Image: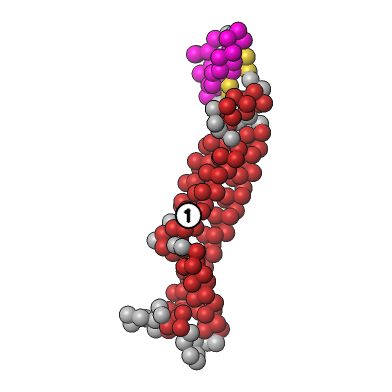
Amino acid sequence: MKYYKHKKTGEIFAYEDQDERNKFGSESLLVMTPEEVTSHLEKSGITVDDLCANIDTAADTARARVAGDPLRAVEYDRARIAAEQFAAAGYQGDVPPMVAAWAINGRTAQEAADDILHEAAQYTAALIALRETRLAAKEQVRALMDAGEVEQAQQVVEQTVAAIEAAVAGVGNAA
């Protein structure tokens, strides 16, 4: 997307590509500098902070969908630790209460521990993907906004939100 301003009126126009500009644009349009584009768009309310906040909100929502409330995340982590300890002991000895709580409906203690560990691995992988995706996208948005490429920055946000949602699909409580 390129932004132009009318050299006499100052009116602003945006075109996807040169063909669109040639078809619909006037000869009296001047290409706007990145600083002018950023200034124009900030006046319309689009800022780097807002775009980055959209990414953070999507990641926060995704984490909440996976783990539920923060105390449930603590519960899951403690169950993981107990399952790891039980597995390291060769599934012998007393079954930790956090594992025993899941050893129900015909599920053995070993099956419960393995299930907890499998879920924990998926949860950890999703958290890593969320962090990597979120932080990389925010840097990309900042760079694009600095270059006056606001539309591309908005597209990065949309693509990132979709990637974040996909990263947690089927994991934990989001299953």
Along the viewing direction, whichever of 74 and 175 lies nearer the viewer: 74
Q: Is residue 110 above or below residue 133?
A: below
Q: Give the residue drawn at x 66%, y 33%.
A: 146
Name the quarter where the C terminus is drawn: bottom left
Q: Give the residue drawn at x 47%, y 53%.
A: 61
Q: Give the residue drawn at x 53%, y 13%.
A: 25
Q: Give the residue drawn at x 59%, y 45%.
A: 137
Name the quarter where the N terminus is drawn: top right
Q: Is residue 131 above or below residue 115?
A: above
Give the side of residue 35 with respect to residue 175, left or right: right
Along the viewing direction, whichever of 156 and 100 lies nearer the viewer: 100
Res. 45 in view: yes
Is residue 89 on the magenta stretch?
A: no
Amino acid at circle 1: Ala
Give the quarter of the image for residue 102. Answer: bottom left
Q: Is residue 5 above or below residue 61?
A: above
Is residue 12 on the magenta stretch?
A: yes
Res. 151 in view: no
User: What residue would you read off at disc 1?
Assistant: 62
Q: Magenta part of the protein: which range?
A: 4-26
Mark 1 neighbour class, 10 Å CA radius: few under 14, some 14 to 19, many 20 or more? many
Residue 67, horizontal then vertical, whole percent: 46, 63
Residue 21, horizontal then vertical, whole percent: 54, 16
Q: Secondary structure at mark 1?
A: helix
